[in-house]
Amino acid sequence: MKLNGALLRGSLVLLISFNIYNALNFLFHLVMARMLSVAEYGILATLFSFMYMLGVFSESIQLVVAKYSAENASRGKIKTLLGKTLKRAFIFSFVIFIVYSVFVWFLTDILNINYYLLFINGFIIFATFLTPTTRGVMQGTKRFGSLGLNMISESLFKLIVAVVLVVIGYGVYGAILGTLVGVFISLIFSFYIVKDIFAFKSEPLETSGIWAQIRPTFFIILMIMAFYSLDIIFVRALFDEDSAGAYAIASVIAKMLFLGTYPVARAMFPLAVESNSRKQNSINLFVNAMSLIVFGAICALLVFYFLPELIVNIFSGKEISIASNLLFVLGISVSLISLSNLILFFKISIGRTKNYYIMALPVLAELVILYLFASSLYLFSIGFVLASIILLVVSILMK
């Protein structure tokens, strides 16, 4: 295996930036887990699961914009891409917000969450559609430092505002409002970062291919995000509030593994696109990225296995034996999801998405398995591992 310098440099910049971002997000959840009751934190984790699922739009748009930005060196064409994408993104975000507002009305009794909380949570949709356009340009033009800085600003303001609002008594509402403030500040900041693009004269750009590529990309990312998020939503519907809260704490800690290794896939993506557009072999690039993720997963799993009680106690400030018992098992699931995500990012970057629809199979399997394994939280977690194995296998088989 030959080491890829561009990947390592890009991964290092993003790894540092993203891990600061993730550390701040981890601190956000740590503080919220300590300031809120276990049941309240379970509600917050469920709301964040909806955010992660809505993030499918963000990831899809960002990947496609990054791909076209990496393929087109002309700043005039990138300006045209930005303008057209932002216009469509705003229209879609408004429509999706209306649909979401109606849809969650029917979930209030099932999830036992106040409708106004779910409704306020939906405003994240606008940032979900608009922010990835500018971030996609940063990623595609390899402005990895700016991309990381933009994400750090989001998590920093989210943490500060949420803590202040929770302290003065707004509870879960304060945590959600803080999150919204953070994402909209980062959206405004992202326009400042790419302001040089707007100084160029627009050049003609054929964008019909962009929307054609969004379909498979959107579907694949939707399946990843749905798979990633459904366990917490299922737990909320199938178990009591305290059990759901304990599972949510273990799940959030385990999923930090996914977020910690995610920068590797992000850094690999534009490099793989560029190699593929030049008809160069990008397998070595993929092997480098896979090695980094496997190393990170092994390190995290060792910590989860030997120090679960300490990790849960540091995170929540409480002795929660259920969460400690689940942490290593959930860590295995998240490791498999991280590997699957990297494989899928690579296949999107080189255009191997012909039978993308098979990615629905792992999600359907997850729904069935989690329901069948819902007799206890531990069995439920084992079911999540089985479903994650299916996800990895199907990710490999997708062509």
Image (cartoon, rainbow, N blue to C red):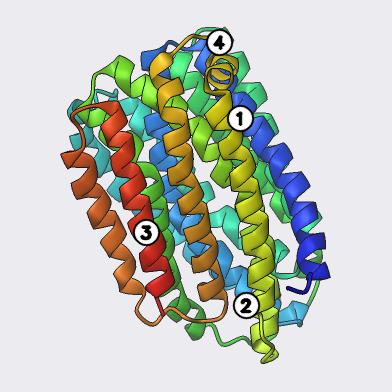
Q: Residues within 10 Å of mark 2 (few under 14, many from 20)?
A: many
Q: Where in the figure is residue 136, as x and y percent of width and height?
A: 64, 63
Say which of marks 3 and 4 sits in front.
Answer: 3
Q: CA distance from mark 4 to mark 2?
A: 46 Å
Badge 3 element: helix
In the image, taking residue 219 as reference, residue 32 lies left or right, namely: right
Q: Quadrant of residue 95?
A: bottom left
Q: Earlier in the sequence, mark 1 or mark 2?
A: 1
Question: Which residue is denoted by mark 4 in the rendering?
Answer: 317
Badge 3 vs badge 4, beta-carbon distance below 8 Å? no
Q: Residues within 10 Å of mark 1 (few under 14, many from 20)?
A: many
Badge 2 element: helix
- Foreground residue, 366 or 304? 304
Q: Earlier in the sequence, mark 2 or mark 3?
A: 2
Residue type at the position of mark 3: Leu
Q: CA distance from mark 2 to mark 3?
A: 28 Å
Q: CA distance from mark 3 to mark 4?
A: 34 Å
Residue type at the position of mark 2: Tyr
Question: Which residue is denoted by mark 1 in the rendering?
Answer: 26
At x 56% / y 38%, what residue is drawn?
Answer: 301
Q: Where in the figure is residue 249, as x and y percent of width and height?
A: 45, 24
Looking at the picture, does residue 172 appear above or below residue 228?
A: above
Question: Which residue is denoted by mark 3 in the rendering?
Answer: 391
Say which of marks 1 and 4 sits in front.
Answer: 4
Q: Earlier in the sequence, mark 4 or mark 2?
A: 2
Say which of marks 4 and 2 sits in front.
Answer: 4
Q: Earlier in the sequence, mark 1 or mark 4?
A: 1
Q: Earlier in the sequence, mark 3 or mark 1?
A: 1
Quarter holding the C terminus is: bottom left
Residue 68's tag is 2
Say which of marks 3 and 1 sits in front.
Answer: 3
